[in-house]
Amino acid sequence: MDLTACFLISLITATMFLQVQCTKAVIGLYGQTIEVPCNNGAPKPDDLIFTKWKYDMEDGTSGDLLVKQAHKDEAQIKALDGYKYRVSIAANFSLMIQNGSMVDQRTFTCMVVYGSNLDEHRVSVSVYKMPLPPQIKDKAKELENGKLTPLGVCVAAAANPAAEIEWSKNGTLLVSDDKNIAITTTVTVDPTTGLSTTRSSLRYTAVKGDIGAKFTCSAKHYLQTQQSPAETFVIHYPTEKLSLQVLAKAPIIEGDNVTLKCKADGNPPPTSFNFNIKGQKVTVKDSDSYTLTSITRDNTGNYKCSLVDDSKMEASEKVVVSYLDLSLSPTGKVLKTVGDNLVVKMEQNSSGEAKVSWTKDNGKLDKVPTFERVTYSDAGFYVCEVSVPGLKRSQSFQLEVEGKPVINRLTKLRSEDGRHKVLICEAEGAPQPSVQWSINGTDEESSYINGKAVHKITVVPSGNLTVTCFVTNKLGEIQGYKCHNLAPGWKFGPG
Ligand SMILES: *[C@@H]1O[C@H](CO)[C@@H](O)[C@H](O)[C@H]1NC(C)=O
Ligand SMILES: *[C@@H]1O[C@H](CO)[C@@H](O)[C@H](O)[C@H]1NC(C)=O
Ligand SMILES: *[C@@H]1O[C@H](CO)[C@@H](O)[C@H](O)[C@H]1NC(C)=O
């Protein structure tokens, strides 16, 4: 910077003349070497005798700093104060002041003596210093919605001249309107360093939209404008909407724990809530939840929550509990005599339409089993399963059918080679009866399926012989006989 202020000085002496004395202005940087040029760095006159630098002292008098004789290499330091160690003269007669500080803000005079002339060139020095990076201090913990609240103080310390502070929100300048935005600025000067600190306090009326807004301040200075790190603030605002959440896996089934959570959109959220549990008011403190443990079908209904201090702020939600009852008769082990009647009764009660399915020994049945007269083939493991979404119930019975043995048929066949007879005794009975022929044979075969026993032997025909089939179980016995050679016709008889 190169500013020159010219003063018109009138000197009235015996002969009146005008002298225009110009004071050049230079700016130096704090902490660095300040160059004070002599006569704008004009070349030195040929008949130079000496150059002297002086300065204006606080008391208004002038003090010598150094003198440089034209014919000598070294300048002679005249200063007695702190300048003694800080000043030197450059080849072009500039005064060089090391480690510039606020005390150097004064006027220096370069005196050039040559031939029979004496010129004086006055230079006023300003020392500039950029402030430390600005910072937002005394930050508000939170901002109250709609209320003018001190937000923070922006500090730009140790500058010269003092920095100018501006506040911005999301990059937009904030201007004091003394209603929603109030900015007050103070500048203090450190008595030791002479540097200025600017403090700007912002009071701000936040709205809900200011959540996440970035506040910054910038310190404007001749040398550079610096910006503070951005700050965001917690905004406090009242609840406008309430919602009730039902926390449970769907569908809710009997025995589940169901948590009702009341959510308020205010910040900070309320710390207590009223829950309306089927007409009964429950106040929950330091929590937003109420848990219904081991819920039952009777808990189905509407639930509500509201603010403790504003019962009109309310939310409600429906809770539907799924249930499923199944009752089957008979269950467990069922023992029936063949030909008996068995009535199967299944009752179910559920929250929705239930699916019913029957299996017998793991095979699917098309319809509900009915037994007007039980047969041996009805014996088996019956399972009834009913289900609604999320729930499944099943019950079962094991049907056992028993009966005295009965001979259904006695058969005599000619064997394939024509030389033997095959005798077949077919009987029924449960538990499994023992089946025996009265004569020994070969190729004995027997089977027992669904209460039907078949016993087969091969014999060699020999003379007149009565053969008998004996069928026995714990419930009784029966026998059938046949006179072997008297075909056709078997005779049956009990024992
Ligand atoms: C005077 O000399 C110094 C040091 O050599 C140099 O930095 C400066 O620019 C010069 N000033 C003028 C006005 O010529
Ligand atoms: C059948 O054979 C057994 C021994 O193998 C014998 O003890 C029995 O007497 C025989 N019965 C008839 C009817 O031949
Ligand atoms: C076989 O028995 C029948 C009747 O018991 C009898 O009439 C017949 O004579 C007998 N035959 C022989 C060969 O023993």
Image (tube, rainbow, N blue to C red):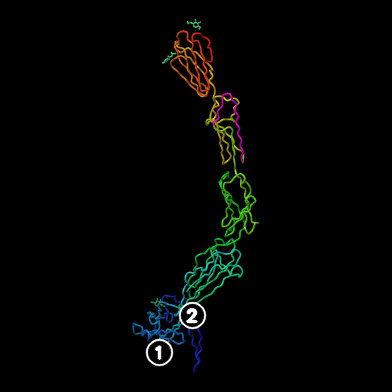
Residue closest to the eye, 369 or 169: 369
Answer above or below: position of 453 versus 25: above
Residue closest to the eye, 150 or 310: 310
* Residue on which the image places disc 2: 4
Residue closest to the eye, 409 or 53: 409
Give percent across and percent down for residue 105: 46, 80
Q: Quadrant of ligand 2?
A: top left
Give percent across and percent down for residue 213: 55, 62
Q: Residue at x 61, y 58 (%)?
A: 239
Mark 1 burial class by Cα count in 10 Å: few <14, some 14-19, many 20+ = few
Give percent across and percent down for residue 109: 44, 84
Residue 336 falls inside the magenta stretch: yes
Q: Secondary structure at mark 1?
A: loop
Give percent across and percent down for residue 380: 53, 29
* Residue on which the image places disc 1: 116
- Of the residues shown, which amino acid type is indicated by label 1? Ser
- Of the residues shown, which amino acid type is indicated by label 2? Thr
Question: Whole-Å distance between the Cαs marked 2 and 1?
Answer: 27 Å
Q: Which residues are magenta?
A: 333-350
Mark 2 burial class by Cα count in 10 Å: few <14, some 14-19, many 20+ = few
Total tally of numbered discs in the picture: 2
Q: Secondary structure at mark 2?
A: strand
Residue 378 falls inside the magenta stretch: no
Closer to the chain start, of discs 2 and 1, is 2
What secondary structure characterizes most of the magenta part?
A: strand
Mark 2 or 1: in front is 2
Q: Are marks 2 and 1 in contact (CB under 8 Å)?
A: no
Q: Residue at x 48, y 80 (%)?
A: 4
Is 40 situated left or right of 170 in this image?
left
Q: Which mark is residue 53?
A: none
Is 280 situated left or right of 478 in this image?
right
